Every structure is written in C-alpha cells, then in structure tokens.
Image (cartoon, rainbow, N blue to C red):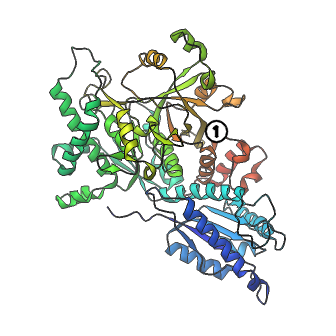
Amino acid sequence: MKKTNYPKIGIRPIIDGRRRGIRESLEDTVMNMAKRVAEFYSTNLRYPDGSPVQCIIADTCIGGVKEAADCAEKFERENVGVSLSVTACWCYGSETIDMNPLIPKAIWGFNGTERPGAVYLAAALAAHTQKGLPTFGIYGRDVQDMGDPVIPEDVQEKLLRFAKAGLAVAIMRGKSYLAIGSVSMGIGGSIVNPDFLQEYLGMRTEYVDCSEVLRRIQQEIYDKDEFEKALAWTKKNCVVNELPDHNPETIRRSREQKDQDWEFVVKMTLIMRDLMIGNDKLWDMGFGEEAMGHNAIAGGFQGQRQWTDFLPNGDFSEAILNTSFDWNGIREPFTFATEDDHLNGISMLFGKLLTNTAQIFADVRTYWSPAALERVTGWKPDGLLENGAIHLINSGACTLDATGEQTKYGKPVMKPFWEIDEEEVNAMLKATKWGPSSLEYFRGGGYSSKLLSKAGMPVTMCRINLVKGQGPVIQIAEGWTATFPEEIFNVIDQRTDKTWPSTFFVPRLTGQGHFKDVYSVMNYWGANHGAISYGHIGADLISLASMCSIPVCMHNVDEDKIFRPSAWSAFGSDPEGSDYRACNTYGPIYK
C-alpha cells in the first residue's frame, strides 16, 4: 500500500509589520525562532509509522493580513493539520492570527523584555477567543534575553503536549471507523454512533456485516501465500503454547477441529486487516473492490453472539492486530476493539496516536479489596497493592505487548514498534499462552490469549462515554500495573475464565472524590470496558479532549499539568466546570 501522507505542523513566525527599522531588526530573530521549533518537533516527534514529524514554515514572517493569507494558502497546499504561531515581539493581533476553524492552534509568545512578545500573545489570544477560535497559549515562566536560542523546559513540555494532541486530531480527520457486525450483547459502546465520529472527530463510519468475513473465507479472497506464511508462523509460535483444554470432555472439540480452528482464525486476521486498510495483492487476484479496504484507522468486531455461537471467535485476530508484530515482522499495531465497542476503540485510538504504542482493551471487571484478597487467598496485600487493585481482564483478546516483556533501563515497558527488537518479540510470544476457548461462552471455538502483565508499568486508563443530552465525555485514570505472588494469582485466576489475559491496575489516589480510594475509581467508571495505554498520558488526553470539545468527567492529573485553550479560563475558575461550559459552548469541530 502507498505511504501515508501524514498532516504536517505549520509554523507561523509573527512579526511587527512596521518597516523602516522595526521589522527589519526582528526578521532573523523571529524566523530563527520558528526554525528552532521546527527542528525541535522533527527531533522529538514521530508519526505512527515511525517517520519524523514534518514541519512547514511560512515563506516570510507574518506582519499583516496579506502575509497571513499567503501562509494559509501554503499550509493548505502542504497538508498542514496543526498550526503554531511564534513571536518575540509585539505584532498586530487579529491581522495576523490563523483563522482556519478546523486546525488546532497555539501561540508561543517569547518571554522577553526587549520586545513585548507576551503582549502580542495576550492580544492575539483575546482575538481568537472573541472570534470563537479556541487557541492554546504558551508563555515561558522565566524571562529570556532576545535571541536566546534555548527553548525552556516548561515551554518544551507545552509545545509537545499541544503538538501530540493536535496531530492526533489531524490524523483522525477523514479516516474511518470500520464496524464489522452489529451490536454485541446489548453493549452500549457497541451501538456505533456515526454522528459522534463525524462531528467530533471528522471520521466516517463504515459498516460491514460479519458475513463478509465468512464470504472471503469461503471464496478464498485473501492472499494465499501470506496465509501459508502466517499459518506456519502461528504453528511455530502459538500452537506450541496451546493450553490444556479445560472444557468438559462431553463438548470438547477434536484435535482435527482445533487445527481447523487455527486455520480459520488466521484467515480471519488477514481478512479483518484487509477490510481495514486494503491489500494490493487482492487486486492482482482480480478482486479490485476488496483490495481498496475502508480507509480505517480503527475498527471492531461484533463476534458475540451471532458469530461465536457457530464459528471461531475473534480473540486471536483481535490480539494479533493490536500487537506490534505478526508473521510479517515488527510493525505498527492496529487499533481494533473487542465486541465492536467503538467508544473503547476510539479511546484506544487516542492513546495510540499520543504514544505510538499498542493499546490494551480490557473489561474493568473486578475490584479486589484488601479484605477480599485476604479472605479468599489468606494473603494480606502490602506495598502498591495495600489498597487493593482493579482486575482488568478481557474475554480472550489482548495485545501481546501487554505482557511487559519489552524492557527499557531494565524495567518492563510498552514501546513504539520501531524500538522493539526480535528478542523482545520472542519473549512476548513465550509469555503468551493460547487457551481453547470456553465452549460455554464461545460455542464455535477459537483461541484466547492468556497472559499476565508484569508489575511496575506506568499506565493510563481512559474511556469515552456518550451521555444523552450532554454528548461525549471522557474518564482518565493514571496508575500502575501490579501483580500478586504466583500462588495468590492462581487462586484469583481460577475464579474466572482461566484462558483470559489479566492486568491488575492500581490507580494513583488523591484521597478525595472519584479517586478517594481504589474502590471509588471502579465504582465511578462509566462502562464495562477501558482502554489502557503505557505511560502517564492523562495531561495529553486532557489537551486532546479539549480540542475535540469532549469534557473530562473524571481524572487524577495534577492541576499544573492541565493544558487547555486559553478561552477555557473565561468560563469560570473551577477547571472541571469551565471545561464542561467551554465544550458545550464551542461544540464539536465538524458540526
């Protein structure tokens, strides 16, 4: 497939337009400021495919409306999706601002005394607010000397937070969410809402019936050479890790049936991927329409129950698609939701675009209190687990990256795919078992990924929910993975399906509100699913949510890390309430 044309970051050097001395004295200073930011972004940010983020700088400094218009024309031509204005001096506010309502915007006003960059910053932000164009303001804490080439750390942090979130907005625009199937078991998030996707994210909704997967299997509309390669890889790395069959003997599938199931689920994986992004090989086979795919940046599979009552489930396919490797080697992970829960799928997409790492889809299943743990296992939890933990366990599918078998500085991590090595791939495969699915749940068979996430990984769990009369809201909880002593985990594991993957999550507590204790986090979680990303990315999620006019209803991010458009401060002094009021006032981007 052709290389993705990712949106670029546009940088607008803003200058005092008065010539005959003032502008001329500032040209190099302001343009160099723009060049430094461009270099900073290209060095520190990457697109989802691992390539450096590209920046486009206006051809000239912008001192008035004509140069602003010339810049806008260039940005349109160059596929700019994020706009950053930079200046070290006073400039003419509304004459120089970016007026494109669809592009996330920020202004960095240099903190210096020789020229009043901060005055322009305040004037331009006021103009943006007055015109209904929310814009992020960046102002360093400490005064610098004019021409100082250093970008202060506090400015760097905000530049990166804005750019990561802005690029996520730009990358989603024009893409599709592919819903394979319909509503799974009455789950609300599985009722795919095209208005939410279109109006808030600029995404299409593509619907494909599950019968299309079956048609392509029966009519052999997949790359047969790749299938043989994939099946051989699966036998070598997954079938050898097949768990004993725990189903009652009276309903167990024969070895022949199980081998057929392995072939079937490998074909499902190829076909689901092809449905999302297309496959040129299908064109060569005479299937031109199927070769194109659905331009999907995320997707989901209904599975239960109409499919899984008589055909192998989607657990293997979902696990492998969400993983940073397969039979073709190490590669970018897909974003693919179990039970076609598109709200969790989009939450996963947010995390992936902000971190470039694989995402965990999980049921927010059980809060294990210290008292319950001691009663059931006889073990009194301590350390990180002294307040208990939330058991995240999906019904059979989870990215293999969640094992924690990737390492950095000797600690378990989840990396962008371009940092993963083959030794880590082998470790992840070895740490993942594949259990014949519980036939009482999945009558058609299949295989579930069985793993236990290593302890000590910083993670962030989030979830978008739709609220009648309000619209979308997002919940965010930062915390860490935890594990129990092996004999204690075995007791817990036997109480649910022993073929399913487990991650134990301990949120960071604040002692009040929704984060008073671990129980409260579980109690206030708004749905049965959560999307878990490596790293503490709550502040990045908050910035992204504000760009999409999605208010945050629950979070445990430190207040000094919260970065939203400057207009939010005009809606009140309480951060949570002002977020709701601002989001309701501005509404979705693409309404």
The quadrant of the picture occupied by the C terminus is bottom right
Q: Residue at x 63, y 51 (%)?
A: 543
Q: Residue at x 60, y 64 (%)?
A: 40
Q: Position of residue 178 (x, y in %)?
A: 37, 48
* In the image, farthest residue toward the right: 113
The answer to whether 133 appears left or right of 503 in the picture is right
41 or 182: nearer the viewer: 41
* In the image, farthest residue toward the front: 410
The answer to whether 252 appears left or right of 155 in the picture is left
45 or 354: nearer the viewer: 45
Q: In the rendered image of this protein, does residue 94 appear above or below residue 412?
A: below
Q: State the image quarter where residue 159 is shown.
A: bottom right
Q: Amino acid at mark 1?
A: Cys
- Which residue position holds label 1? 553
Confirm whether residue 100 shows in the render: no
Q: In the rendered image of this protein, does residue 38 appear above or below residue 380?
A: below
Q: Position of residue 44 (x, y in %)?
A: 57, 59
87 or 364: nearer the viewer: 87
The answer to whether 77 appears left or right of 63 in the picture is left
Name the element at disc 1: strand
